[in-house]
Image: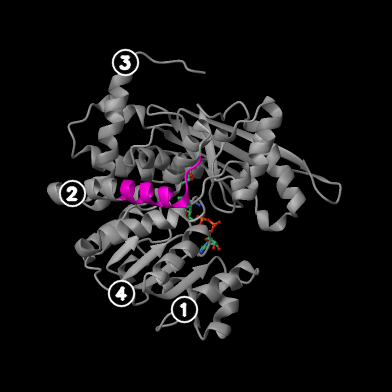
Amino acid sequence: MTDDNLLDRALIRLEEAASHLQIDQDVIEKLKYPRETTKTSLLIRMDDGSRKSFLAWRCRYDDTRGPTKGGIRFHPDSTIEEVETLAFWMTFKCAVMNLPYGGGKGAVRVDPRTLSKSELERLSRAYMQAFARTVGPDRDIPAPDVYTNAMIMGWMADEYNQITGSVTPAVITGKPIALGGSLGRNDATARGGFYLVQHLAAELGLSGSRTVAIQGFGNAGQYFAELAAADGNTVVAVSDSAGAIYKADGLDVTKLIAGKNSGKRVADLAAELGATVISADDLIAVEADVLVPAALEEMITVKNAASIKAKVVVELANGPVTAEADKILTEKGVVVLPDILANAGGVTVSYFEWVQNRQGFYWDLEEIHARLKKMMEREGRAVWDIAQERKVSVRSAAYIHALGRLSTAIEAHGTQPYFVG
Ligand SMILES: NC(=O)C1=CN([C@@H]2O[C@H](COP(=O)(O)OP(=O)(O)OC[C@H]3O[C@@H](n4cnc5c(N)ncnc54)[C@H](O)[C@@H]3O)[C@@H](O)[C@H]2O)C=CC1
Ligand SMILES: O=C(O)CCC(=O)C(=O)O
């Protein structure tokens, strides 16, 4: 195995965890490659009458534990390698949380900010036309990810219903409430991470009020800022793709979110908030108890890990810390709450949405929050205990926890190849 590709680098974490377990090599072999990845191009009519095509993928990495589950990303830098790696991580995330799912992911290589609303709708519908036979409530269930949202999920759900001539809300999650979306899905990723930090606060040395720095100010980052501020913490720094800002005595999160939602970048809001514009690397190095990467993969690397001053890194993003950076953080005594646990609140409430769609009976927000809290605490505690007992990182413990469940399921399937279409 080489270490020059994102999936290879992700597999190193799996092999590391497997080395702590008496695990059949067959299990590792089964998880080494995706079950299927479909690539296509989406040809859409632009508003000016021209036609444009966009590369698109859907990967079903492993469905041993259930239908594959995972978001769809719209990003100009998306690649097949990224999609497959994100689907690999989904496989482990769903197993960590004991959700009855395997892992999947999808993407379109596009900068959605350059499209009009109607072009975005045509592209979203084209994605569902292309993958209508890949997805399904018992086969593969997409959801939002970077630069996709409830509106896009709504268009895709509608397109699926038109293609199949049925009303099948459980084919996709993160939908608008009016189309069968769940209460509490919008802030679920951040809320899950927030419940986890609260539950482990004493063990993490985070008692009392904390200072927080957040990289990436979209769905995950904004809601984490809101929850942290409402709990009496101080959000000292945030960034988006265009810049970062810092204020030692705390940013006004309400104003920040309002400004961002009005279309401004965080750096545009610096003067209004009395904050200083800083660089992306400065954000990682600010004095804060908690650093929350909530943007993209491999943002914390050998180049900047040593500068981190936070006690705890909460990975709301998928794959933000490289394996080499992990080692540096461990040596510095920084605890990393890993993506496959820390950001699992999103897929957990997606699971609640799918359950509600299938039973046709909907829960109130209190029930969603109570169930999410219980699951984050249960699996978070199990992972934490593994880390203590085996003297491994929390990331390795999360992989060990997931791998135990995956290997039981893989063995239960038996040795014959199975040919579910
Ligand atoms: N939305 C969800 O339910 C879940 C999201 N995640 C992960 O969380 C991360 C963020 O996703 P969302 O918040 O949903 O996306 P989003 O599209 O709502 O926001 C992404 C944010 O990251 C910022 N960003 C992009 N490149 C950046 C860079 N180089 N430096 C700093 N900021 C940058 C963008 O400006 C934007 O503020 C991704 O890794 C995603 O896979 C994980 C679990 C669930
Ligand atoms: O909500 C979901 O089903 C998946 C969200 C997702 O893509 C992720 O957790 O990375």
**Residue 107, located in which quarter of the rendered image?**
top right
Identify residue type, mark 3. Thr
Identify residue type, mark 1. Leu
Alpha carbons under labels 1 and 3: distance apart: 56 Å
Instruction: Looking at the image, tell me whether mark 2 or mark 3 is earlier in sequence order.
Output: 2
Can residue 227 be found in the magenta stretch? no
Q: Which mark is residue 385?
A: 2
The residue that mark 3 highlights is 415
Magenta range is 362-376
Q: Which SS class for mark 1?
A: loop
Q: Is residue 305 left or right of residue 51?
A: left
The residue that mark 1 highlights is 251
Q: Which SS class for mark 4?
A: loop
The residue that mark 4 highlights is 209
- Residue at image location 58% in from the left, 45% down from the top: 175
Q: Is residue 31 left or right of residue 361?
A: left
